[in-house]
Structures are given as structure tokens and as C-alpha cells.
Image (spheres, grey):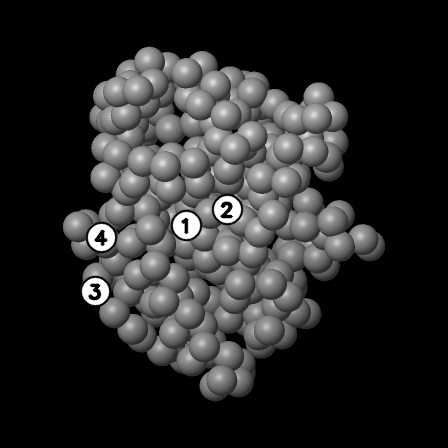
Amino acid sequence: MAKQTKISLIIFYFLLCFQSKGLPFDEKGWKSEKSTHFIVYYKEADGKFVRQSVDKAEEYYKSIAENLGFTRYDFWLWDKRAKIYIYNDAVDYRKATGKPSWSGGAAYYHEKVIETYPWAQGFFHSLLPHELGHIIFREFVGSENNAPVWLDEGVAMYQEKLKRFNLKTKLLQALEQGKLMPLNKLSELNIAFVNDKEIVELYYLEALSAVDYLLNKFGRDNFVELCRLLKERKTFDQSINGAYRVFKNLEDLNKAWLRYIKE
């Protein structure tokens, strides 16, 4: 299977994990390693991977909260800590979770739970920061909000530093080929049901670029205000206008974002 196809499948899978698992997570028979914001459960996983999972999770927790501007808000302490379940190996993980062979991990946002197995491909530099980005963002804006899915996905993608590499070049190519989608199109797409891999990958790159633009051009305080207004169930147009003033609505944001890509 080609690398790009694997990436697309992983993206599809994590999007489909949006819903609650629906079943309680059983800690019986698991060992645990606790930190300030996480509890890592494991059975026979090697100690090096367990310690690295704890360290990386705490590192990402801090960096994600900081780069989004959410540092004034205390999440995940004591009984509110997020949980990471590390199965013994890939076979054990798939048998217990029913996940397909290409899955390196799964996230359940409502429970603040991530499941994986030792040394799953891309776990530390991609899957872990991506899913923690989702969890932190969704906890901040609440479960009932008007945040568009592309904003949520853009925040998660923003945590994967490698995904930002050469981003403008890729989007300029899509623009020149007439394939770049306006932001209102992203808002209309239910990406979970799109089968075209090229559209899926472009959707995620555009979402990442839009979040990158808002954070790097205007700073974190404005982004926090945008999220706060969305949490209050303001429409996106009301929220973007209230947080940034220079934009009246999504269309204004789209025009400014296109100029940013061309810079």
C-alpha cells in the first residue's frame, strides 16, 4: 500500500472515532504510570515505550495548550486526567479493539482516551499530537458549539509539525490547478463520507493552512476569543467578526487566507 494511501486511511479512521466508544474502559489487570495530566495503562509493554508515552503526552499537552492560547485554563487534573491504553502488541490491540490492520491507534474524544500499541508507526510524531489537539480543542469549546469541523481538524493538524513543511507550495499548486476549495466548501463537506483521496488530503491541508494563518497572522488571543464565541454558540460569521473585526464573515476570511497563500 502506498504511503499516501496509508495516510488517507489513518485520517479517515480517526475522523470516524469522533463518537464515544459506548463501552466502559476496564482498568482491571492493567499496570499504570501516572503523571500530572495522564494515566498510561499497560500490561506487558516495555518500560521505555511507556515512559516515552508519558513524557511525550505531557510535552504535547503543554505545547498544544500554549500554541492555541489555552494556557489560562486548567484541564485534566486528578480524576480528569486523560488515559492512554497501550496494548501488548499490534495483534493484541486489533483483537481487543476490532480495528483494521493499518490502524496504529484510536481516540475517543468524549472519554479523553487514546488506544495504541508499542512503537506503532507515526504514533509519537503524528497520531498522539493530532488526537490530543482534538481533545484539548473540543474540551475548550464544549460538546455543543458552532465550530466547523474543518477548524477542529485544522487545529489537530497544526500539532503535527511535519505537516506544516512546504504547506504553501502544495496549496499554490492546487490553486494553479483549479483544485483549491474555498473555506465555505470545507464547511459544507462531510469529509467522513468523501471517498476521493485527493479531496480528503487537500481538505486537511487547507484546514491546517487556515488555522496556521489565524494563529501566525493575528496571534493566540484572537484565536481564543474565536473559540470562546463558538463555544457560546455564536455562528461562525458572528464569531470571526467578533474575534478579529477585520473579517465580517467567512467569505472575508477566505479572501484574506488566499492572499496569505500567495504571499
Q: How far across and how far down the image is residue 157, in percent?
A: 50, 46
182 or 195, nearer to the observer = 182
Foreground mark, 1 or 4, reads 4
Q: CA distance from mark 2 to mark 4?
A: 19 Å
Q: Quadrant of residue 185?
A: top right
Residue lying at 72% horizontally and 59% vertically, measured from the top left: 101
Q: Closest to the observer: 108 or 122?
A: 122
* 164 left or right of 38 in image: right
Quadrant (top left/top right/bottom left/bottom right) for the N terminus: bottom right
Q: Which residue is mark 1?
A: 133
**Residue sitting at x 19%, y 54%:** 74
Q: According to the image, label 3 marks what residue?
A: 78
Q: Where is residue 262 shown, x and y percent of the image?
A: 56, 30
Q: In terms of sequence position, does the residue under pointer 1 or pointer 2 come before the other?
A: 1
What residue lies at 26% left-to-right and 34% top-to-bottom? 222
Relative to 62, does residue 208 appear above or below in the rendering? above
Residue that mark 4 sits on: 71
Dot 2: what SS? helix
Is any atom of residue 251 visible in this view? yes
Which mark is nearer the camera, 2 or 3?
Answer: 2
Q: Looking at the image, tell me whether mark 2 or mark 3 is earlier in sequence order.
A: 3
